[in-house]
Amino acid sequence: MEAHARLVVAGHGGSLPLVTKLATLAVAAGAAPYAHLLAASHPACDSFLLSSLARAAAHRGLPGEAIAFYGRLLAAALPFSSFAFTAAAKACADLSALRTGMAVHAHSVLLGFGSDRFVQTALVVLYSKCGQLPVARKLFDAIRDRSVVAWNAMISGYEQNGLAERAIEVYREMQVAQVVPDSATFVATLSACAQAGALDLGREVERRIVSDQMDVSVFLGSALVNMYARCGLVSKARDWFDRLQERNVVTWTSMIAGYGMHGHGREAIKLFHLMRREGPTPNDVTFVAVLAACAHAGLVNEGRNAFDSMKRVYGLVPRAEHYCSMVDMYGRAGLLDDAMQFIRDSIPEEPGPEVWTAMLGACKMHKNFNLGVEVAERLIALEPENPSHRVLLSNIYALSGKMNHVEKVRNVMIKRRLKKQIGYSLIELGGTSHLFRMGEKSHQQTREIYRYLEELIHRISDAGYVPETDSVLHELEEEEREVALRYHSEKLAVAYGLMMSSGSTAPIRVQTTLNSMQKLWKRYILITYLYVHE
DNA sequence: ATAGGGTTAG
């Protein structure tokens, strides 16, 4: 404002470029209303000024303001530039405002900016953020001479929407197109690797980063830590974590989550304590990781303290995930009463289905069937259309030997046409991912895999393996149940992995969508390990 | 005479 006053006094108050610069700075400093005033008071407020303001606002994370400036351009019937469209598209992307974004898109095409590479790239981001990936892809494909930023937008678009495999495909296409990647490419690609468990590619990217002597920013460093942590190479993650010259809350949280995820609860807590002493301030995501680690490692007191400090010291408001971890933590430790008391006393509103699902898991684990049935019925009342709750209820009945009740639940499910969706497992071999569903038959080597699995099952049975039949999905028919047990997706993936790497003692990594299978899975790893090393 | 699009953790 002082600078503005000086400008006016010096007789430059009417100089548009200077006012533009000033207003842009005002927005960048967070004083959007002042910029509005400046723009409104200037007699010759032009297209350049307003689109600069729109851009600055979009950049500053003020999407509403950006759209307001875009609106003023429209209202004043001023000429549009591509700048106005990139800013408006980014603002809509940040708001996930698909309808408004589509209007901006249409408007840009109408005014002849349909093949402006900047506008096209901004629109790819817009549609990705709104979950419209086919549209984003179509726009991306239409860009002539795609810049590295366009490629990055597409990779990250897939990755952010949980389509890591597609993201990796785009990364490979980018290599074929001989576009030189930059650090944002690697950040997005490493995230995709973390998501897909694509360790080979992750390592390849790491090698490139190192050999190119690329500057490892917090972003890139966190992406590396995250990739190794999620792929299970916790000590590799820690190496990078220690080596980074800058670490922020994301870096720390990734590392803590990595420990927790792979059964190093104590390490997770140790690092969390270090973070509180000399690291950045933990946020809500950090506490998700910490509480999950406590639940996993049975660190009840640590978890209770963390939950307490989360609210009291850091002023964070717990979400469903935090509540779930707490219930899970008490539950796993066998403290079912504490879990119920926590649900009653510490959750402000009506607990969501996730919380009851965690509670139900605890009841199952500790064979408290009466409480389990009670909880399952609450769940069904809460979400009558969700088939998995009924599956859980039928499991509880089966575990307590009430087979007539199992029948009843199953009949209701059949009558209501409720079907549980099937999970899958992924294994990466030689840079290619292979997806298996339960009873999968579409893989090229299906015959060999099944034959190999038969042999494996035979041999581990000899070694004393007995399948855990009581927790099988009870909505399945009798023969399907057998298939589910013998050919569930993880088994297929493991068999394939072992088959393709026979003779090697390198670990096999499988990613799976089914949490309930993880227990089963851990045991399986042990058995296959024993088998391979016998 | 003034300005662009992409980047990490659950």
Image: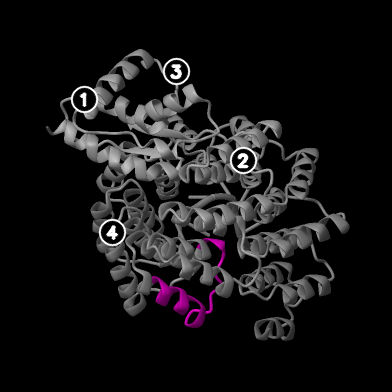
Q: Is residue A316 above or below residue A286?
A: below
In contact (CB < 8 Å): disc 2 and disc 3: no
Q: Callout 3: residue from which chain?
A: A
In terms of secondary structure, what is the magenta stretch mainly? helix
- At mark 1, the secondary structure is helix
The residue under label 1 is A459
Determine if residue A380 is in view: yes
x, y percent for residue A380: 65, 49
Q: Quadrant of the C terminus of chain A?
A: top left
x, y percent for residue A69: 77, 62
Q: Quadrant of the N terminus of chain A?
A: bottom right
Q: Count neighbours of disc 3 (C-alpha within 10 A) and say few if under 14, some if 14 to 19, many if 20 or more.
A: few
Discs 3 and 1 share one subunit: yes
Q: Is residue A363 above or below residue A4?
A: above
Which amino acid lies under the numbered mark 3 shown in the image of this protein?
Answer: Lys
The residue under label 4 is A264
x, y percent for residue A173: 45, 30
Q: Report the front residue among A224 and A235.
A: A235
Q: Callout 1: residue from which chain?
A: A
- At mark 4, the secondary structure is loop
Give the quadrant of residue A509.
top left
Q: Callout 4: residue from which chain?
A: A
The residue under label 3 is A441
Real-space Cα separation, disc 4 to disc 1, in angstroms: 31 Å
The residue under label 2 is A387
Real-space Cα separation, disc 3 to disc 1, in angstroms: 23 Å
Q: Count neighbours of disc 4 (C-alpha within 10 A) and say few if under 14, some if 14 to 19, many if 20 or more.
A: some
Real-space Cα separation, disc 4 to disc 2, in angstroms: 33 Å
Q: How many numbered markers are drawn?
A: 4
Of marks 4 and 2, which one's residue comes earlier in the chain?
4
x, y percent for residue A386: 64, 44
